[in-house]
Image (tube, rainbow, N blue to C red):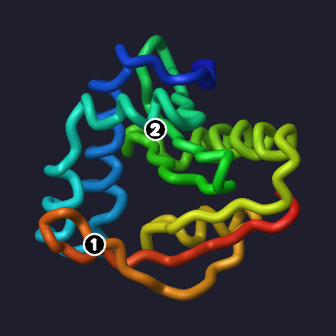
Amino acid sequence: METVSIRLAQPADCASILEAHVGAIRELCNAEYSQTQLAAWAERLTPSGYLPAIAKNTFLVAEKEGRVVAFAEFAPSRGEVVAMYVHPKHARCGIGTMLFREIERIAVAQGLKSMQLSSSLSAVSFYERLGFIAGARSVHRLGNGTEIPCVAMTKLDA
């Protein structure tokens, strides 16, 4: 297996982040969401849309062969994993777990006792394997009004 490195995202990574994000939505979430939901979810994304998160939060990328193949956004002030996506060509290879372990390390270093996130229906079992407990189902409403069902999840003892 080629080496995967984890590092902080840079503005120059935005196009590759977008590619991983859209690919993950369209290919890894298609069993749980309709084509209308997937399109509304993916089509609102733009490369420049990641810039505020890169500047404000802990925004990590996983890089393989010089290319961003996954990313994770963590808001330490809220103990929230805001987003984590792996490009479908690199899914189920341990890259998401690597990203999460780095977020977990950061959370522990900052003294956080718990973490939370809102999971897509597609990723609930992934987060459960990482020690998160599923809570109530909820809905994320996109700017265009499309509703994306999700699950609130919490991990104690970060």
Left or right of 79, for residue 156: right
Give, as a three-letter code, the residue at label 2. His
**Tag 2 or tag 1, which sits nearer the N-term?**
2
Left or right of 124, for residue 20: left
The quarter holding residue 10 reads: top left
Left or right of 38, for residue 80: right
Taking the spot 72% from the left edge, 37% from the top edge, the residue there is 102
Residue 155 vertical placement versus 136 (above, below)? above
- The spot of residue 41 in percent (x, y) is 23, 59
Residue under label 2 = 90
The quarter holding residue 16 reads: top left
- The spot of residue 87 in percent (x, y) is 39, 40
Give, as a three-letter code, the residue at label 1. Arg
- The spot of residue 21 in percent (x, y) is 34, 43
Residue under label 1 = 141
Disc 1: CA contacts within 10 A as few (<14), some (14-19) or many (>=20): few
Q: Considering depth in this image, is 130 or 143 the residue closer to the camera?
A: 143
- The spot of residue 86 in percent (x, y) is 45, 43
Q: Quadrant of the N terminus?
A: top right
Label at residue 75: none
Between the C-alphas of marks 1 and 2, the distance is 28 Å
Q: Quadrant of the C terminus?
A: bottom right
